[in-house]
Amino acid sequence: MTKLLLILLLLAGSGILGAQPVAATEDRLLDRIIAVVEEDVIMRSELLQRMDDVSQQLASRDGQAPPREMLVRPVLDRLILERLQLQEARRIGIRIDDITLNNAVESIARENRMTLAQFRDRLVAEGMDFPTFREQVRDELAISQLRRRQVDARIQVSEQEIDDLIASESGAIDRDVEYRLLHLLIALPEGATPEQIRAAREQAGHIREEAAAGADFTALALRESAGRQALEGGDLGWRRASQVPTLFARHVVLMREGEVSEVIRSPSGFHIIKLAERRGGTRALVRQTRVRHILISPTEVLTSDEAFERLSGLRGRIKDGADFAELARAHSDDRGSALQGGDLGWTDPGDLVPQFEDVMNRLSPGQVSEPVRTPFGWHIMEVLERRDHDGSRALMRTQAREIIRDRKRDDELELWLRRLRDESFVELRLDALNLDSPIRPIAPLEGR
């Protein structure tokens, strides 16, 4: 906003520009500032327009819109939070380029089963200015990206929370699954002393280490177990999920074939189980890719074009025989993978950003890509190998993690927005709001 325009607005709001005829003042009011939000302002016209939009939405949903005066405060609060979030997005460098914006608008059109031209015509027919709609989408994308950075990063999901959620749903998750379990028990006498308990725990721990290192579990059970199936090498046979002892159920559902459990305590002693086999249920075979990459990120002193040129030079050196891993360690801006020669390890579909995955999926093992741009910068990548992997357990954990994150996200977002609002300068000028008077428009504010 130019200083002159802001001064004119403030003077008009205070009446310093001079008296107007009473009738004209009653019929048409100048647009006025309703709130100052840090370095930005919210105009009366914006508030009234948003109130009209909300009123129409509520009327279409509930059949009746609430009185307009009831909408003033909640709508104004939402506008203030939107302004603060957009300012914060600009402050930390979030910019939505035209390519990203175009893709988003086209996606909205497809969701409405229209071409972009048909969608634009529909908006115009409904009274919506298409460039204004595009800017609204740009703002929504910026706010969404800001929340992912500032809110999602604060959400922590522990492995224990995932285990607990899966265990609580194990009956539903593994309804059609059967398990073949091997079992070993280090028994405790009734009324065991602390010394006896400690000794039994240590013995169980040593046996568990042997089993996890690959020792023959059947032989260990024959030698060490006090369980009823010791003579069968601890083999409990095939059991449906509902037939697995409750003590073991929460562990079994999380285990892979061949995996040995941690030591499990019960009143009778210390147990160790091994999942020998698993059958039934739905298996999710996942095509995994092991890939390595080199990332060059633009900075304040390195433009995107310069990052592209630098990466192209590194690719040329690799083509001439230079070692990919050595160049990754020396040049990649992804310091986590750089220490591993750029190796990202085995990745599942969806682990990496779409722009990266799209190119990766088209590469053959040993092939080095052209430079690829993602939100993180410019990459070159090389696929090392691929495999089909039973991702049932991993998929289960991923789904559980997302369920927990969704449950936490609303609370974390509410806390973050409250903190953002409390730490910002906001001045309300509701005395300038007159719901019964029309507005004489003023030219749009610069920078809005």
Image: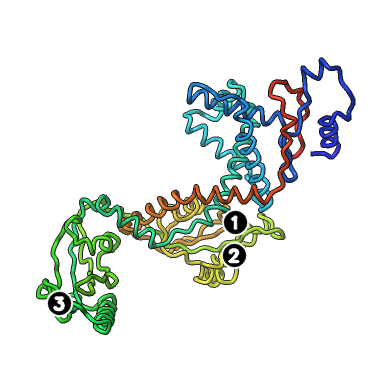
Locate residue 273 relative to residue 406 in the image: left or right: left
Q: Amino acid at mark 3?
A: Ala
Name the residue that disc number 2 marks.
Answer: 333
Q: Which mark is residue 73?
A: none
Q: Position of residue 333 (x, y in %)?
A: 59, 64
Q: Residue 179's image quarter?
A: bottom left
Q: Earlier in the sequence, mark 2 or mark 1?
A: 2
Q: Residue 52's image quarter?
A: top right
Viewer-closest of 385 and 214: 214
Viewer-closest of 331 and 365: 331
Badge 3: few (under 14), some or many (20 or more) residues near its Cα, within 10 Å?
some
Locate residue 406 relative to residue 77 in the image: left or right: left
Q: Nearer the viewer, mark 3 or mark 1?
A: 3
Q: Residue 319's image quarter?
A: bottom right
- Give the secondary structure at mark 3: loop
Q: Which mark is residue 226?
A: 3
Locate residue 223 relative to residue 263 in the image: left or right: left
Q: Position of residue 109 (x, y in %)?
A: 52, 32
Q: Quadrant of the C terminus?
A: top right
Q: Amino acid at mark 2?
A: Asp
- Give the secondary structure at mark 1: strand
Q: Quadrant of the N terminus?
A: top right
- Give the secondary structure at mark 2: loop
Q: Nearer the viewer, mark 2 or mark 3?
A: 3
Name the residue that disc number 1 marks.
Answer: 377
- Cα separation between marks 3 and 1: 60 Å
